Image (cartoon, rainbow, N blue to C red):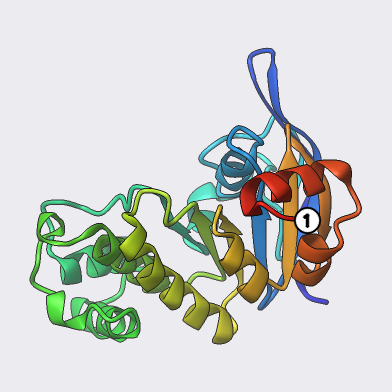
Amino acid sequence: MDKIINIQHLQKSFGTNEVLKDINFSVARGEVVCIIGSSGSGKSTLLRCVNLLEKPTGGQIIFKGESILDDQHDTRAYRTKLGMVFQQFNLFNNHNVLSNCVVGQVKVLKRSREEAEQIAMKYLTLVGMEQYILAKPKQLSGGQKQRVAIARALSMDPDVMLFDEPTSALDPEMVGEVLVVMKKLAESGQTMLVVTHEMGFARDVADRVVFMDKGVIVEEGHPEQIFNQPTQERTREFLKRTLGRL
């Protein structure tokens, strides 16, 4: 199995508050891994450590065989290999939809504007936003903004797509349109690490589900096993609370 991300003994503290405790797991190329758990369990912090928005306190993150926490490692180059989709979209409000998907390619990847626009259009079409290329973010719904954010991340040709609760800021009727796009990506073989509270998505789309609680990985496995036959009491309690069954 070709491990693209391998996390070993990862720790993160904010002052005396230890948010991540000895985290060990990996993501293989082409795999979709969903991280589930209650608010405050450390899920988003883990994702922010993976893309170095937070500096881990200890442990290792190995990306394609290289330790990214070594001082000599090029953080900026590493970040270009990760597509990050945030809860709050993080679009450039002064740019239109097409420009949002072009500017990073031109500035960071040094592509020509023409090539960048072609690539942007490919992904805007994939997410169903090609007819909105001249719209500014303020003219879009939350679901549309998130689809543009996904297209923007994909335009950078990332090795891994990271999703941090991508539907949590959306109205319920907009959640589905974003999940449909994510499902399409998963089916295309895109490597994805997804922090989510959408249990149906995790159950139906993930290759592996990781359940976190209080800064530790309590249990991980195939969705069928996690959702239908969890081995840990804490997992059972969480699913009972979330799904109202088990």
Dividing the image into 4 quarters, which one contains the N terminus? Answer: bottom right
Residue 139 horizontal side relative to residue 86, left or right? left
At x 38% / y 63%, what residue is drawn?
175
Q: Which of 192 and 117 is in front in this view?
A: 192
Q: Which residue lies furthest to the right in this view?
A: 231
Q: Where is residue 42 in the image (x, y as percent from the top left)?
A: 65, 37
Residue 236 rendering spot, x and y as whole percentages: 80, 48
Task: Name the image quarter holding the C terminus.
Answer: bottom right
Eyeballing the image, is 229 above or below 54?
Answer: below
Whether residue 4 can be seen here: no
Whole-percent x, y for residue 28 in the image: 74, 71
In the orientation shown, which residue stands out farthest toward the top?
16
Seen in the picture, residue 11 relative to 93 is either above or below; the reply is: above
Residue 131, above or below 86: below
* Residue 44 visible to the viewer: yes
Residue at image coords 30%, 75%: 111
Closest to the observer: 166 or 110? 166
Mark 1 highlights which residue?
Answer: 246
Left or right, residue 150 beside residue 80: left
Total labels: the figure holds: 1
Q: Nearer the viewer, residue 228 or 186?
A: 228
Residue 60 picture location, percent across and down: 77, 44
**Circle 1 residues within 10 Å: few <14, some 14–19, many ≥20:** few
Please identify the residue farthest to the front as the structure is shown: 245
- Tell me what residue is drawn at x 8 percent, y 72 percent: 134
Residue depicted at x 62% and y 75%? 205
Secondary element type, mark 1: loop
Amino acid marked by disc 1: Leu
